[in-house]
Amino acid sequence: MVEGHVTISNLEKVYESGDERTKAIDDLSLEVPSGQFLSVVGPSGCGKSTLLYLIAGFLEESTGTIAVDDQPIDGPGTDRGVVFQDYALFPWRTVMGNVTYGLEQDGVPKEQRRATAQEFIDMMDLDGFEDKYPKELSGGMKQRVALARTLAYDPKILLMDEPFGALDQPLRELLQDHLLEIWGDLGKTVIFITHDVEEAVYLSERVMVMTRHPGTKKTTVDIDVDRTQPREDIILSDEYTDVKNQVWQSLREETQPEAQL
Ligand SMILES: Nc1ncnc2c1ncn2[C@@H]1O[C@H](COP(=O)(O)OP(=O)(O)OP(=O)(O)O)[C@@H](O)[C@H]1O
Ligand SMILES: [Mg+2]
């Protein structure tokens, strides 16, 4: 069965506090087919995080609908897993305790949840660190724990909000390749927010560029790069360079509208 298809129709989000109304998302429609890796780029404040939290079910839309496999979403659910930039680990739980958390919520028996958690701890090269607390880990390790925690409960859809933004370049590249491997193996739908055009084009099959605030879909660009090649061949390929320039240009029109005059 094909799963993890996201349909967003005429989505609008207005934040209201007191007399203030801020329209953050304006009439956005988007289809993300099951198993697609989609990146989202757009100027700061255009509503990327808002969009992700709406899909996650943390926020409620003002108008429009979001459906997963044709079912309108109703709050958060374990069909969608969120990974944040700042890891959001539970400081009072060990690595194992963090990774088993979602399975506990799902009522999985203890033995089984430890076995499942161990699988993802190993996948993220964190074996030997099961009993450490988040404060004892580096940034890259914390982000791998956060990924393992989300993958362990097997969501159909991964929602990632600038997950590698706080990491240095080598670590970011390592985790990007890790994520691509996992995506290839597990075939999940991924919606990945980044402000880094190169990261978006390197990772994804399609990039959505958003307009400046209040954000809506400006365009989507398909990327047809052979990802079985080594990184250095990908980034030197004509396809990669062309798409990167196209996305960069489109984004620049939003961040520097005066440059179009
Ligand atoms: N809780 C809130 N209440 C009121 N306005 C908000 C709230 N959260 C976000 N906004 C506003 O909504 C708009 C979109 O914010 P959002 O955080 O989604 O942008 P973003 O694209 O993720 O930005 P960045 O790239 O800087 O992370 C901004 O104008 C912001 O000020
Ligand atoms: Mg944001």
Image (cartoon, helix red, strand yellow):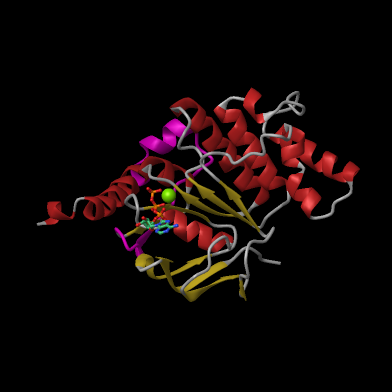
Residue 15: x %, y % from top left: 42, 65
Residue drawn at point x = 36 percent, y = 44 percent: 197
Residue drawn at point x = 31 percent, y = 47 percent: 242
Between residue 246 and residue 208, name the one nearer to us.
208
**Quarter of the image where the C terminus is located:** bottom left
> Relative to 246, does residue 145 appear above or below in the rendering?
above
On the image, which quarter does residue 17 sit in?
bottom left
Residue 172: x %, y % from top left: 49, 32
Residue 223: x %, y % from top left: 42, 52
Between residue 107 and residue 172, name the one nearer to us.
107
> Relative to 185, does residue 121 appear above or below in the rendering?
above
Q: Quadrant of ligand 1?
A: bottom left
> Relative to 12, does residue 260 appear above or below in the rendering?
above
User: Over which residues does the magenta segment extend?
Assistant: 212-239
Q: How many marks do you count on the picture?
A: 0
Residue 23 visible to the viewer? yes
Left or right: 163 in relation to 99: left
Residue 207 visible to the viewer? no
Which residue reaches farthest front? 18
Left or right: 181 in relation to 208: right
Left or right: 121 in relation to 260: right
Asked whether 224 falls inside the magenta stretch, the response is yes
> Relative to 82, does residue 117 appear above or below in the rendering?
above
Between residue 75 and residue 149, name the one nearer to us.
75
Asked whether 6 falls inside the magenta stretch, the response is no
Residue drawn at point x = 63 percent, y = 70 percent: 74
Which residue reaches farthest left? 261
Residue 94: x %, y % from top left: 74, 32
